[in-house]
Amino acid sequence: MRSTATRQQWVVRVALAMAGILTVAIATPSPPAHAAGTVTEVVVDQAGYSAGAFKLAHVVATGVLPDNTFQVLSGSTVVASGSMPDRGSTWGSRVYDIDFSTLTQAGTYTLRSNGVSSYSFTVSQNMWDGYKDEMMAFYRLQRSGESSADAYPSGYSTVAPSAKALHGAGHLDDAASEDGSAHYDLTGGWYDAGDYGKYAGNQWVGGEIALAYVRHATAPTLQFDNDDNGVPDLVDEARFGSEYLIKWANAFAGALYDVPHTGGWQHPDAITDGISGTADDRRIRNLGVGGSAKAAGALAATARAIQAALSGSHIAADKVADFTAFAAACQTAAVTFYNYAAAHPDGPVGSYATVGGLPNSMLWAEVELYLLTGNTAYQTSATGRITPLTFADLRSTSYWDLRPLSLAEFYPAADTTTQTHIKDLLRQQAEYAMSLADDTPYGVLDTFSNFGVNEPHAAYLADLVRYYELFGDQPALREVLRGTNWIFGDNPWNISWVSGIGTDYVDFIHTRLDEQAYDHTNTGIVLPGAMVSGPNIRDPQDVNSAKPWYQDRPLWSDDVQQWRYNEPSISIEAGLMYTVMAMSDINDAPSGGGTAPLVLPITSPRTGDLVTGDVTVLAQPPSQMSAVSVGSTPMTAGNGVWSGTVNVDASAPYTNLQLQVRGTQQSNGHYTYSGAGVTVAPPLPDPGHPLLYDDFGNGGTWGSQNLGWVNWFNQSGGTGTYTQTTVDGRTVGRFAQTPSSSSSWAKFEPWHDYGNFAGYRYLVLTMKNPGYPDAQYKISLNDGTTTCSLTGGQFRSVGTAWADQKLDMDVCPQIDRGRAHLELWLRQASGAYGELLIDQISTTDDPSGTAPTLTAGSVSPTTGTSIQTFTYSVTYTDADNQAPQALQVVVDGVIHAMTAVDSSDTTYSDGKTYQYATTLPKGIHSYYFRTTDSTSAALSTATVAAPTVP
């Protein structure tokens, strides 16, 4: 449900990779003004809270607050107050809990602490009931082959879509055969994500929509019919997805393929002519036997949903015959798909493969077919697949793993032995999710990666709801409430990641429905209910960014990586959809009882740390545990602290690693988990450690992202192309230009990437001219505000043999090399076609002078408590009077920059002292110092075992 948009004030500064550099400011409405002090945000669930349910919010601060109280206000009247437990430091901020569950009166409120207020939020009898329409609106707007007017009747949801999201019926000419010689009626289905592809591996989604109805078919809240067609909307939507699958079953006897996306940033009806048999018909690709099995389960689930609606007399009388026949058609098609998958066990799994391959999807099909038909052959096969499963075989329910959903579905119909096994597996999964979510105050799954956390997070929430539905486990329900709070705004970014819901919600959704996405004046789009993928471990454009990271960044500033954090999809949405639907029935059921997994906090390293070499992992459980391990490595116990070592030397620079600790609770033998996302540091810059940027074979800090280079701009006409190829046994990048005249230039860039070249003097390109005498290049750096040419603004020629082009970055002293973006230009003076080949790009230094020394290294005190400050100190001396390019203390494998005691002292030849001060968790720590002047070999001191924190 929509609140008044009073968006935060923020400024986005983006370096445009075009002819020049442009700084653009985007102003959005402000949140409540912050008073002077240390509070930065008071964050709430902007979707609201149910009156009788657990209610949690948070205060985010720069440090310990002098006042740990909060107030709940209705207008200017304080209606409740209390104290806030200090949760310590999370992601660089101090966080306090606000539990205001005692407030049960419906109304509109704000929270306030230390003079800072939250966005307004509502308390209602059933907050979930107000968002079912947005969940369904998202799927209706993703429908292929229907106009917006047909798929989304005016006023369908409380939150209306942006006018520019509305479009005509698209892809009415789906689809041609792989060779284009035949045409099949494959219109319909949902567009998968921000593009318009339809993929075999995501055809399970209709099944979860159907089961959201089946599992709560008697609940009045699930009978909603917002389009007034006499059919519950959940059943309507499941049918829509199944109609598409039945077409495939009829056309291909159970084989299922992808229909990939084609076209640009346009509405779907503008991409093809909609006429079958013409050249723009999309062609099927990529057989997916796994998709066939998933389709079987989805169709069977849809038939079950229809049967449940018919049984409850929830389908209009004049539609009963049609839906009865359609349920039978679903069953027939489900069997067709299942038989095809069973007959092709070694066929390609296809898109969106599941954990463990085809058997995973076959279990889903067999469970749903058994529950639909009662055929014991399906039951027997499903039981056989479940028996050998261990917890290691499970993830969360999404395209990668249908087992948790299948197990929850099968449990009531399984034999006693299998029920015991299923309950144990689902309990372990629930405890895994709950214990990773207790790593932070926000209740978010602590598994950040290079793709947004919201998809796995919401998928686990749906699994926890199903676990609660089966076993009434109140801690699982409590985590569902905390986890949805995170999605709807109770997070450090103070943003709802669901379009249209809340006061400050995501604007720049990665969707081709937003045809103005490249317009710098674009203010975004509303797709009701669309949940985006959300925070990454780091900014995909900046290896030095804070961790975890999120920014609601417009497409024109990041048109290659935006999908990693701002894309919705029918799969990403599925877990949240199920959760909202189920919770509209469960609502404010008690959630404060039961026993949650013990907390197992990792005290070092912490998420966001930069690590190197041997990393000491410390965990400090509040109660006794046994068999604690980090990954598969056992940890050792001492003085209430568990310690283990992980070596990260084999990982490439800037690799994001997820360290995970598991412990066994001695009281019941159950596991509990904790995680920390760390980044592997590059070596210190010196002549012996060049930094590989791109080897054009998926190596290097940019090349490892496997995204290639783009021809960003063509001056005076012509075209440029980039391809990865093999020449002389080397994997290389081919940069080619077809000019329209002798004045044509082609510009290439590594998309919007900014490399960290700090400490290096030279940029080295290993290049070759394959036989185009007048092909020349020039190259520039920019750091987001300034552009500087490394070739003096002149084009240079390249020889016909492989050779290094060594460019001195000192010619650009104004460039911040810690944030350096490459721009490569190509031209042919004759105006004819030409190309250049690049084998690799790296940065390096030349040796010179005398190496520095590090002396008098120490830590003080050598023993102390966890609230005491420890100061590390070392003296840096360089006979050449060179300043250190970096001076760091490495504590337990975690890198910390040191600062000069006397910043005015610029003489390094007689020694200069550097320090770093911090608190330390319990444990026996170690440290060493390291430095480089970049012109001699980097050096490190010996490792010292100290201090001890008992």
Image (tube, helix red, strand yellow):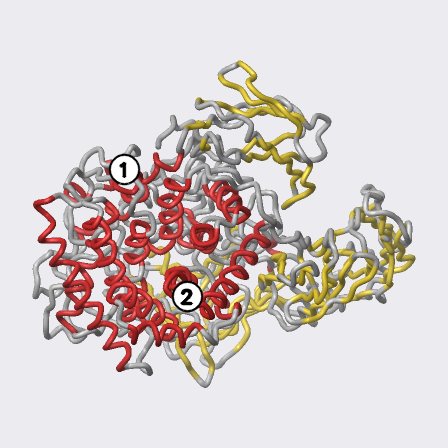
Query: Does 97 sit above or below residue 875?
Result: above
Report the residue marked by disc 1: 161
Work out which quarter of the rendered image holds the N terminus and state it. Answer: top left
Label 2 crowd bin: few (<14), some (14–19), many (20+), radius 10 Å: many
User: Going 34% across and 53% down the picture, which residue do you hit?
Assistant: 569
In the image shown, does 940 or 920 lie closer to the viewer? 920
Q: Is residue 43 visible?
A: yes
**In the rendered view, does 517 fall on the left or right side of 902?**
left
Q: Is residue 880 above or below residue 287?
A: above
In the picture of the structure, the residue carrying the numbered disc 2 is 403
At a point 11% along the width and 56% down the height, the residue shown is: 273
Crowd tier of the residue under label 1, counting other residues whose Cα lies within 10 Å: few below 14, some 14–19, many 20 or above:
many
Q: Is residue 227 above or below residue 211?
A: above
Marks 1 & 2, CB-CB < 8 Å contact: no
Determine the residue positioned at 58% across, 54% down: 436
**Image position, residue 133 (x, y; %):** 29, 39
Q: Residue 608, position in %: x, y?
A: 63, 53
Nearer to the camera, 759 or 128:
128
The amino acid type found where label 2 is placed reads Arg
Q: Quadrant of residue 299?
A: bottom left
| SS at mark 2 in the image | helix
- Left or right: residue 801 versus residue 614 is left
